[in-house]
Amino acid sequence: QVQVVESGGGLVQAGGSLRLSCTASGLTFVDYTMGWFRQAPGREGEGVAGIAWNGGWIYYGDSVKGRFNMSRDNAKNTLYLQMNSLKPEDTAMYYCAAETASGSWCDVRNFGYWGQGTQVTVSS
């Protein structure tokens, strides 16, 4: 049984930093492209970042480029998202997901394994 679990969310002031983690079990982690997505109330879901199985490529959404850094440790089956210079508009539920179908890194339809999410709230 595949389990994906996010952690590290919380409340932070604008300009601050948070580091999200995501651990996956029940799958061969190194076989999967991984992604971070976010969903805020009243807004469309958004692809935050995606990373190849070996870290060979990393893509970021336009709204987080230069502020967020995604990485993975395949030996630990863990994915990370370092979020710096946080803004109130970054407030959202953040989800980690494993890609199960080939396609765009930011298309949620290509990701079949999802965590329950971790809430990030940025106060102004």
Image: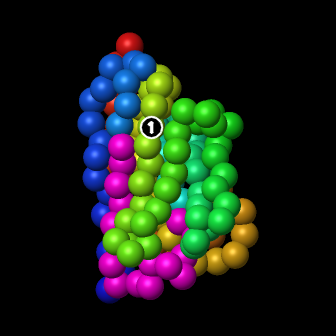
Residues drawn in magenta: 19-34
- Label 1, secondary structure: give it: strand
Q: Where in the figure is residue 74, as x and y percent of width and height? A: 44, 73
In the image, taking residue 88 as reference, residue 2 lies left or right, namely: left
Could you tell me which residue is drawn at 58 percent across and 71 percent down? Answer: 54
Q: Image check: 42 left or right of 59?
A: left
Q: How many marks?
A: 1
Choose between 29 and 95: the one closer to the eye. Answer: 29
- Amino acid marked by disc 1: Met
The magenta stretch spans residue 32: yes
Residue 95: image quadrant is: bottom left
Residue 91 lies in the magenta stretch? no
Task: Give the residue at x 54% y 60%.
Answer: 35
Can see residue 37?
no
Residue located farthest toward the right when viewing the structure as drawn: 103
Left or right: 108, with 124 as reference point: right
Residue 44 pos. (x, y %): 58, 42
Task: Note whether 30 is above or below 55 in the view shown.
Answer: below
- Taking the spot 38% from the left edge, 13% from the top edge, the residue there is 124
Q: Name the image colouring.
A: rainbow
Q: Is residue 16 visible?
A: yes
When the figure is inspected, residue 8 is found, relative to residue 58, above or below; the finding is above
Mark 1 Cα within 10 Å, few/some/many (few <14, many 20+)? many
Q: Which residue is mark 1?
A: 83
The quadrant in which the N terminus is found is bottom left
Question: 102 or 75, which is in the foreground?
Answer: 75
Q: Quadrant of residue 13?
A: top left
